[in-house]
Image (cartoon, coloured by chain):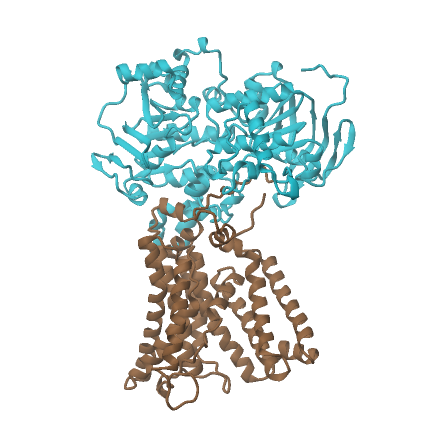
């Protein structure tokens, strides 16, 4: 009679992580000619040098931001599946903005470029919120479609009109030196953006759990109908969560340009948006839960990189492992977190409105 | 029905004990029950008395910590509900779980699918079987309808039908009448008698003593996990059972007792004059109505859901609105609470037209609302008790947008104490009993100092004490000059609380009754749209 919480139990999350690690080991043993070395490299690689360690923490920074973005949307009961495109859009807008205003001071340039990128991503996600608000279109679908459409366009921009003529890489020109964020652990790419990411997590935590708006935000996510009867302006909690979720993805994309690569690379955002969703799920959509979840994810990600570089581990295998981790973690509570989506998938031919019987209050403790 | 005294009983439970460590309570302590063929046995007790637990043990859903189950005199063990089903013991739960998108027959045959050639499901056989059963027992269920389109009482009937498909020897029904109108209750009771005459044993878990006396042969009373008494129905009285249920320490107000368990006396003796004097206000208070709806109509396509409904309520009065389910009560609830904008007509408060206002603006105008649908509209099950309590007062408990922890806790503790909510503030609402959930909703709605309060089915599924509490609050509000609209399908509730009564039939107000004109029989006639009632209504308007 006991219904599990929509955010999954801690035990379930731990089980999913253990399952993911076990599957990884099995794949490593099966797929590598030197399994022992591959396993060692996979698990110890991230700590083997400052370079790898710093890059792991940098991956953590990005995952915290996208994870926060996804979690904030979940908390309001809306779904931003367009993270990939939003990160990518923010990156190219940031790169263009930075190169367009080289005369600005360092602080001014960073603020301008960052602001432009974040604004672009927020608008992109906010559109889906607006559409739902105006016409009741499903933001889960529209955010995904808009983002998916944006990706090939940006690919084209980077390869074509915005390409760096001085480089053989598929990238935009590098941004002015003055606008590059301070590196913390050279030679790795870790930059001071990490401080911002952790502060943002703390800020989101405070806003969600200690303010009236945060209360309305969470209550709307738990039961929109109830919030509406309680006088909460629920329309606002479709629009703003999408805007802010997009904005956080935008920070991730902008940091990529300002801190990590100093340019927008073709296809760099591959997986960032989806991994953000996974991080939010592991972190139970809690802003402070997102931090350890992002760390675990960053560790596994960096581990597969080092395994590729140091053993005969192939990139395909690394991708498979990432996919397996994502799959195991999300599958566990996909139907709980996305009841709407799960119902739709399960009833391809059914009508869109679901009329599930509401859960009964527990009686007699049974 | 004591013809088989020498035969071993069909099922016997001996000294069943069950403890839920997380709740630190004995759900059942040494409970013994005897279940005989052809007998309807009622199991009564307050919420948390252990009725459901012992029945879940019998149905194989829980295994007891100790105790025995004897089947025809032989000891047996149920590891799983399917063991109990194999032994012919079935339970119909209070909230049957179906797949709403699927049809009735698809839901009912799960696990006992009739096979055609090639091993496919024989749809025709399934539908024929269900239709045959439904016809035999006069159940208005079409096996081809989708569950999601059924009214909740029909869903319940469908669940009973599903149990009958499995030919049970023992059928356990958990609060089967909760969603039913009086008419449906009669139908259900006919079915139960019929089943008992076939030699099946029936167990009825219920809060309503009136029903116990109407249908049961024997009654078992449980309190705090213990089986406190067992009586043949002819050898007990309502007041004895009430006292047994709540314990000696609890004072039972005799008026409330009448109301809560009003036994349906023979019609002749149930004339109006014996109503408690305090209930009837012959002279309606003067003054303009505070809240009213005028000529409200609502359509679904061309189908009228509400036609030309006009009602109004003054400060310090209770307007009771009753009717059989499916006659427009739920749409009326939606219109007066601001959740549905009617196709024509208007909603008015203080002579101000608010028809198109959102529920949010209704609240701001001081209209509080305790909805029928407590789990979705009335509360958030996943939010904590505190988060549910503060909803309407959130703006007053903050400074510059940040909650003030002290005033937050002070406010919640105050409500908790005043309404006797027994739960910690941090608990998710889902963990609370039905009575406590309703208290949380009630205390929140009354925290805004409302001028108009809409109650819809405020006592559904509540136990004795909680009902008593709710009724006292309603009366207290009335005495504090609040205008109250009480929507309820329970005639007794309507009769004893309301100053004026409107009866709905097929989306229109069939009649409005006040003073001595209000009797159970008149209301029932209008509810059912009986010929003479219709004539009276059309010939002379409202009496």
Residue at 39% across / 69% down in the picture? A86
Name the side, left or right, on which A25 lies relative to B8: left
Name the side, left or right, on which B453 lies relative to B176: left
Q: Position of residue A271 (x, y in %)?
A: 49, 71
Name the side, left or right, on which B211 lies relative to A247: right
**Foreground: A292 or A76?**
A76
Which residue appears farthest toward the right when viewing the image? B74
Residue at 34% across / 76% down in the picture? A93
Q: Position of residue B124 (x, y in %)?
A: 57, 35
**Foreground: A86 or A157?**
A157
Locate the N terminus of chain B by quadrant. top right
Q: Is residue B481 visible?
A: no
**Foreground: A198 or B408?**
A198
Q: Position of residue A272 (x, y in %)?
A: 47, 71
Q: Choose top left, top right, bottom left or bottom right for residue B129.
A: top right
Q: Is residue B470 above or below residue A277?
A: above
Which residue appears farthest toward the bottom when viewing the image? A166
Q: Position of residue B191 (x, y in %)?
A: 57, 22
**Which chain is drawn using cyan?**
B
Name the side, left or right, on which A243 lies relative to A301: left
Which residue appears farthest toward the left when viewing the image? B351
Q: Choose top left, top right, bottom left or bottom right for residue A167.
A: bottom left
Q: Is residue B396 above or below residue B450?
A: below
Q: Is residue A364 visible?
A: yes
Locate the C terminus of chain B by quadrant. top left
**Which chain is drawn using brown?**
A
Q: Is residue B380 above or below residue B128?
A: below
Image mark count: 0
Which residue appears farthest toward the front when viewing the image? B117
């Amino acid at each position: 009679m006991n219904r599990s919480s929509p955010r999954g139990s801690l035990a379930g999350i731990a089980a999913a992580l253990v399952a993911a690690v076990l599957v990884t080991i099995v794949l490593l043993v099966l797929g590598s000619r030197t399994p022992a070395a591959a396993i060692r490299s996979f698990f110890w690689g991230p700590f083997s040098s400052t370079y790898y360690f710093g890059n792991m923490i940098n991956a953590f920074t990005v995952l915290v931001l996208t994870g926060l973005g996804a979690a904030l949307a979940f908390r309001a009961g809306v779904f931003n599946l367009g993270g990939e495109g939003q990160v990518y859009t923010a990156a190219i807008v940031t790169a263009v903005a930075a190169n367009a205003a080289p005369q600005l001071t360092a602080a001014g340039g960073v603020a301008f470029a960052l602001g432009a990128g974040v604004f672009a991503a927020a608008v992109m996600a906010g559109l889906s919120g607006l559409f739902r608000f105006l016409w009741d279109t499903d933001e889960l679908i529209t955010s995904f479609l808009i983002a998916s459409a944006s990706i090939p366009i940006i690919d084209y921009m980077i390869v074509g009109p915005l390409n760096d003529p001085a480089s053989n890489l598929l990238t935009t020109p590098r941004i002015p030196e003055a606008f590059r964020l301070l590196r913390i652990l050279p030679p790795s790419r870790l930059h001071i953006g990490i401080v911002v990411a952790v502060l943002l997590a703390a800020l989101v935590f405070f806003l969600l759990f200690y303010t009236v708006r945060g209360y309305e935000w969470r209550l709307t996510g738990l039961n929109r109908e109830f919030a509406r009867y309680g006088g909460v302006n629920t329309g606002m909690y479709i629009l703003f969560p999408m805007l802010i979720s997009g904005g956080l993805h935008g920070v991730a994309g902008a940091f990529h340009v300002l801190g990590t690569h100093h340019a927008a690379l073709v296809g760099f955002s591959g997986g960032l948006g989806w991994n953000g969703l996974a991080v939010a799920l592991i972190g139970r959509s809690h802003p402070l839960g997102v931090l350890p979840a992002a760390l675990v994810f960053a560790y596994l990600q960096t581990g597969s990189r080092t395994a590729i570089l140091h053993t005969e581990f192939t990139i395909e295998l690394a991708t498979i492992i990432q996919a397996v981790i994502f799959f195991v973690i999300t599958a566990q509570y996909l139907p709980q977190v996305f009841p709407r989506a799960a119902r739709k998938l399960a009833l391809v031919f059914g009508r869109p409105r679901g009329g599930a019987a509401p859960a009964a209050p527990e009686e007699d403790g049974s | 029905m004591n013809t088989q005294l020498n035969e071993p009983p069909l099922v016997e439970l001996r000294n069943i004990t069950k403890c839920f460590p997380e709740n630190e309570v004995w759900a059942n302590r040494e409970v013994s029950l005897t279940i005989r063929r052809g007998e309807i046995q009622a199991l009564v007790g307050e919420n948390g008395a252990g009725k459901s637990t012992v029945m879940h043990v019998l149905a194989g859903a829980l295994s007891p910590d100790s105790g025995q189950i004897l089947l025809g005199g032989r000891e047996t063990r149920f590891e799983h509900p399917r063991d109990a089903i194999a032994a012919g013991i079935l339970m119909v739960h209070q909230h049957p779980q179906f797949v709403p998108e699927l049809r009735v027959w698809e839901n009912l045959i799960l696990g006992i699918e009739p096979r055609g050639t090639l091993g496919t499901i024989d749809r025709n056989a399934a539908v024929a079987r269900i239709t045959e059963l439904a016809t035999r027992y006069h159940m208005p269920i079409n096996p081809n309808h989708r569950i999601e389109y059924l009214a909740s009482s029909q869903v319940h009937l469908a669940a009973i039908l599903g149990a009958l498909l499995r030919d049970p020897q023992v059928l356990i029904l958990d609060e089967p009448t909760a969603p039913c109108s009086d008419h449906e209750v009669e139908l259900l009771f006919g079915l139960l008698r019929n089943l008992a005459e076939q030699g099946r044993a029936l167990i009825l878990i219920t809060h309503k003593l009136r029903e116990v006396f109407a249908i049961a042969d024997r009654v078992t009373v449980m309190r705090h996990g213990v089986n406190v008494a067992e009586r043949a129905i002819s050898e007990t009285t309502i007041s004895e059972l009430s006292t047994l249920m709540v314990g000696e320490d609890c004072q039972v107000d005799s008026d409330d007792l009448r109301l809560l368990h009003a036994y349906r006396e023979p019609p002749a003796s149930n004339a109006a004059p014996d109503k408690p004097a305090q209930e009837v206000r012959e002279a309606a208070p003067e003054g303009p109505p505070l809240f009213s709806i005028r000529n409200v109509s609502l359509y679904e396509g061309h189908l009228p859901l509400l036609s030309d409904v006009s009602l109004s309520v003054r400060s310090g009065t209770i307007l009771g609105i009753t009717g059989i389910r499916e006659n427009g009560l739920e749409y009326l609830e939606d219109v007066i609470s601001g959740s549905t904008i009617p196709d024509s007509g208007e909603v008015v408060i203080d002579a101000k037209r608010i028809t198109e206002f959102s529920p949010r603006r209704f609240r701001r105008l001081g209209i509080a609302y305790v909805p029928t649908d407590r789990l979705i509209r009335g509360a958030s099950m996943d939010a904590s008790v505190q988060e549910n309590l503060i909803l309407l007062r959130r703006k007053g408990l903050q400074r510059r947008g940040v909650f003030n922890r002290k005033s937050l806790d002070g406010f919640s503790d105050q409500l908790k104490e005043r309404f006797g909510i027994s739960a910690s503030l941090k608990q998710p609402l889902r963990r609370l009993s039905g009575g406590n959930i309703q208290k949380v909703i009630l205390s929140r709605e009354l925290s805004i100092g409302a001028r108009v309060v809409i109650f819809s089915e405020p006592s559904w599924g509540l136990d004795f004490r909680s009902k008593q509490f709710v009724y006292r609050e309603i009366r207290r509000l009335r005495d504090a000059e609040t205008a109250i609209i009480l929507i309820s399908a329970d005639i007794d509730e309507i009769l004893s609380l309301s100053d004026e009564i409107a009866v709905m039939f097929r989306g229109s107000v069939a009649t409005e009754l006040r003073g001595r004109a209000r009797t159970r029989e008149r209301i029932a006639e209008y509810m059912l749209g009986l010929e003479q009632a219709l004539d009276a209504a059309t010939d002379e308007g409202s009496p």
